[in-house]
Image (spheres, rainbow, N blue to C red):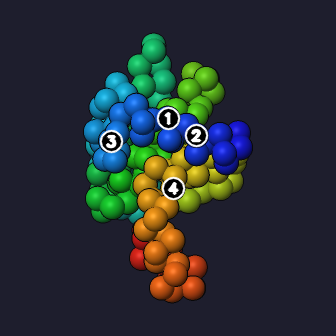
Amino acid sequence: MTIEAICREVERLMRKFAEPDPWKLAQAMGIFVDEQPLGKSPKACKGFFLYQSRQKHITINSDLPEMVQRIILAHEIGHAVLHQAAAKMRAFHDFALYDTSSQFEYEANLFAAEYLLDDDVVRERLSKDTFFFSVAKELA
């Protein structure tokens, strides 16, 4: 899937639901979100998406800081939107933040970034600080 197609999908969802909060977006989309303690280790599962019996289910690691949970939830919503057909055959589980080891993970990361980051805010921060990584850290 192209970056443009992912951006269009996020735009479509924002037009339809007008919901900047990923927990409320998931609820509006009929996705069940469960928060469970999955461990604090860097190797602990961060979250996963399942699609079974026409039910979409996301589990988020409640041991993570709320800001990280927000990113993980947006990422898993990305799987729910972009990869529903593939999820019928396998679960999407994430053990690393910003994993780009597969096309599906890369696309879900792009979805989360497009959903969570406001373009105007990013441009404003970049105009004040040209060092990309410091801006990325601030916005995370």
Mark 2, residue position: 8
Q: Secondary structure at mark 3?
A: loop
Mark 4, residue position: 113
| Number of numbered labels in the structure image | 4
Mark 2 residue type: Arg
Mark 1, residue position: 12
Q: Secondary structure at mark 2?
A: helix
Q: Earlier in the sequence, mark 1 or mark 4?
A: 1
Tell me how far mark 2 sits from mark 3, CA to CA: 16 Å
Question: Image point 58% across, 34% down: which residue?
Answer: 82
**Residue 103 spot, x, y in % from top left:** 70, 45
Alpha-carbon neighbours of circle 3 within 10 Å: few (<14), some, or many (≥20)?
some
Tell me how far mark 1 sits from mark 2, CA to CA: 6 Å
**Residue 40 spot, x, y in % from top left:** 36, 61
Front-lying residue, 4 or 1: 4
Q: Secondary structure at mark 4?
A: helix
| Front label number (4 vs 3) | 3
Q: Earlier in the sequence, mark 2 or mark 4?
A: 2
Mark 3, residue position: 19
**Residue 107 spot, x, y in % from top left:** 62, 46
Q: Secondary structure at mark 1?
A: helix
Question: Image point 51% across, 41% down: which residue?
Answer: 10
Front-lying residue, 43 or 30: 30
* Residue occupying the far top of the picture: 53
**Residue 101 spot, x, y in % from top left:** 68, 53
Q: Earlier in the sequence, mark 2 or mark 3?
A: 2
Tell me how far mark 1 sits from mark 3, CA to CA: 11 Å
Q: Are marks 1 and 2 in contact (CB under 8 Å)?
A: yes
* Above or below for 13 versus 37: above
Question: Image point 63% across, 27% down: which residue?
Answer: 86
* Above or below for 128 versus 115: below
